[in-house]
Amino acid sequence: MVCMASDRPPVAHHRPQAGRSAPLPKFRVLSGIQPTAGSFHLGNYLGAVRQWVALQESHDAFYMVVDLHAITLPQNPADLRTNTRLAAAQLLAAGLDPERCTLFVQSHVPEHAQLAWVMNCLTGFGEASRMTQFKDKSAKQGADRASVGLFTYPVLQVADILLYQANEVPVGEDQRQHIELTRDLAERFNGRFGETFTIPKPYILRETAKIYDLQDPSIKMSKSASTPKGLINLLDEPKATAKKVKSAVTDTDTVIRFDAERKPGVSNLLTIYSTLTGEGIADLEQKYEGKGYGALKTDLAEIMVEFVTPFRERTQQYLDDPETLDSILAKGAEKARAVAAETLSQAYDRVGFLPAKH
Ligand code: TRP
């Protein structure tokens, strides 16, 4: 069965305090996405962005495009700017609603860099050295050439989360260690300087939305795929997308059945189908009983086209009107700053910084 993250039972810890007659305040969630890829791919969308959209209904949601994180690896300035708008446009096209959530660009809120410095000074060198994502990314570049920024990337992420007193952080499994670090540093700060930060929980997005490469279903769909035929970019020509679905790798058997181990290709197609349409896997197995892989692929290709066509159009509308897009982001940054500035000023005070006289 495929479940969305929003189908989960309510979380067991206490809700933030509310007055007697006031409605219960919502839990706060916060997450970020890097503006480095250009087009989102199907894995990003089904694995993360779609859940962000659902969470804005049930939670007080803060979402940001993390451009400060992006420059931990070299970026071309013009591309960075384009990709930042592109990421925001795609988030809006996917259904984030600036009336229901706070959507902003990280560098528009200077408090992120400011709190990160304080957190850097609470982080042990050895502690930061143990972050596996840093080890992977720095090994790729040649460890000596990795920037100090890449080394403290997780500490900036800690600041992102703590500034908003987030209760939960919706991320993929690969980010679990960074959320653990966030909890450790929040507890360390609170212990040393007095209660200041909410201790956040990871909200790990469901395994079921894990999407695999269409040509090599043993690896996760990612932009670093070995062949572009395995990767579905949402902004590609819908026709090209349909073609990729139709030429997805399956197996020599002809039975349409979910079996991740023995039939990873077909299972991946069923997952995508089910996640996009809401039809259960078992129902799909029944629907395609006695039919070949061709029928499944043709139908899924059509479903994909119906999904990506309006997504591309909506994204393009935002890109064609950068003034509107930028003003949505400016309003988001203003809302975000109101929260971030208050937390930062408390943290500065607790640490013992002399207040600046106005
Ligand atoms: N490191 C996250 C990723 O690569 C992105 C990110 C930056 C983030 N700041 C965040 C995620 C704060 C959640 C909360 O996916």
Image (cartoon, rainbow, N blue to C red):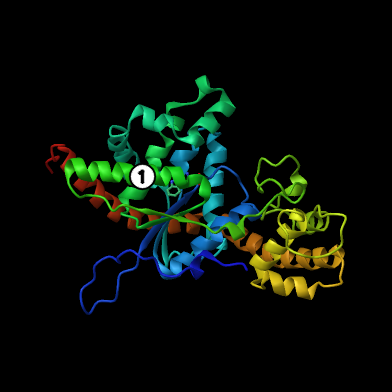
Q: Is residue 219 left or right of residue 353?
A: right
- Where residue 133 sits: x, y (%)? 50, 36
Q: In this picture, is 249 found above or below 50?
A: above
The residue carrying mark 1 has its beta carbon less than 8 Å from ligand 1? no
Residue occupying the far top of the picture: 144
Task: Label 1: state its secondary structure.
Answer: helix
Residue occupying the far bottom of the picture: 21
Residue at 46 percent of width and 47 percent of height: 176
- Where residue 90 sits: x, y (%)? 57, 56
Q: Is residue 327 left or right of residue 197?
A: right
The quadrant holding residue 180 is top left
Q: Quadrant of the C terminus?
A: top left
The quadrant holding residue 288 is bottom right
Q: In this picture, is 17 found above or below 243?
A: below
Residue 321 visible (yes or no) = no
Disc 1: which residue: 182
Within 10 angstroms of label 1, few (less than 14), some, or many (20 or more) residues? many
Residue at 32 percent of width and 49 percent of height: 162
Number of marks in the rendered image: 1
- Where residue 191 sits: x, y (%)? 20, 43
**What amino acid type is highlighted by mark number 1?**
Thr
- Where residue 43 sits: x, y (%)? 63, 53
